[in-house]
Amino acid sequence: MSLKISIKGTLWVVATPIGNLADLSPRAREVLAEAPILAAEDTRTSQKLVAIRQTPPRWVSLHEHNEESVVKRLIGLLGQGHDVALLCDAGTPLISDPGYRLIAAAHEVGIRVSPVPGPCAAIAALSAAGLATDRFFFEGFLPARTSARRRRLESLKQQAATLVFYVPARKLPKALADAAAAIGTDRLATVARELTKQFETIRRASLGELADWTAGDPDQQRGEAVLLISGAPGAEPKPILIDALARELAAELPPARAARVLSRVSELDRREAFALVEALNRKNS
Ligand code: SAM
């Protein structure tokens, strides 16, 4: 009887620079220098990252339109023991870039997936935007059609977390004008354009001001940008208000009803609301 041991390859998910090539981490450089197979959206764009390799890698092009068949091929190669490094044109794969199906398929067949973290435009922009970062809502690209874009922005008006959008800079004036109309001209926002590049520009102002500024200066419409919009002010009831409301409800209603009402108007679930009402009742008895 022959015993066959199968050793599968590793799928490396490699972040690459979003502008400044010096941001390629030593570990990313190492994986890109050694992985026998590199999967990238546009293999020509990624060539420069592996210029130092002694043996050229086998390139596999993975994009939205061929994902299904290429995923099967890559999973086959990983299953035969070959390492694969997934990269995108710039930044972190899967963040508004292809790769999700490949990673999901790898998990399903027990292939090791390991990230090599690094640049990501959304995270770089958040770190320098001067807006709250305790919670953020990554929306990625807005719809191209005006009506759909406005509806999407409208639906995010009450979102309490900082909103993060990817916007090609040429579309900034329209996106900002629509955001100002849907969310409010006074809402604080930041445009982070050409991050890590020569003409890096980060400006924090109201949506109305940013809309006028980008519309009036063609230089602000060049390159790539992240638009961040601060969350809706007072969108969440403050804990102190929940306590006050719970006290009133506990005094006026039987515990189960008080808890039901409280869980409807707050983020507490029924059990948490009931526990709070009970605690208040005990305190008052
Ligand atoms: N996966 C990438 C990442 O990790 O950031 C994002 C890819 S997405 C296809 C491209 C978008 O990212 C651009 O349209 C722009 O909104 C944003 N972006 C990429 N590089 C940027 C940069 N240097 N400065 C500002 N935004 C950038």
Image (cartoon, helix red, strand yellow):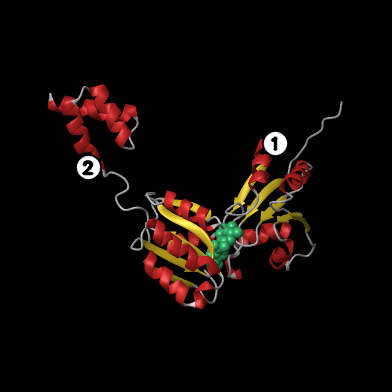
Query: What quarter of the picture does the C terminus occupy?
Result: top left
Residue 132 placement, left or right of 9: left
Q: Amino acid at mark 1?
A: Val
* Residue 68 drawn above or below residue 187: above
Q: Which mark is residue 240?
A: 2
Which residue has dot 1 on it?
109
Mark 1 residue element:
loop
* Residue 114 drawn above or below residue 216: above
Residue 42 x, y percent position in the rendering = 71, 61
**Crowd rating for badge 1 (residues with CA inside 10 Å; few <14, some 14–19, many 20+):** few
Residue nearer the viewer, 281 or 210:
210
Q: Amino acid at mark 2?
A: Ile
Residue furthest left as drawn: 285
* Residue 274 drawn above or below residue 171: above
Q: Nearer the viewer, mark 1 or mark 2?
A: 2
Mark 2 residue element:
helix
Q: Residue at x 19, y 28 (%)?
A: 250
Residue 251 x, y percent position in the rendering = 16, 28
Query: What quarter of the picture does the N terminus occupy?
Result: top right
Counting residues from the N terminus, which is met first, the one under dot 1 or under dot 2?
1
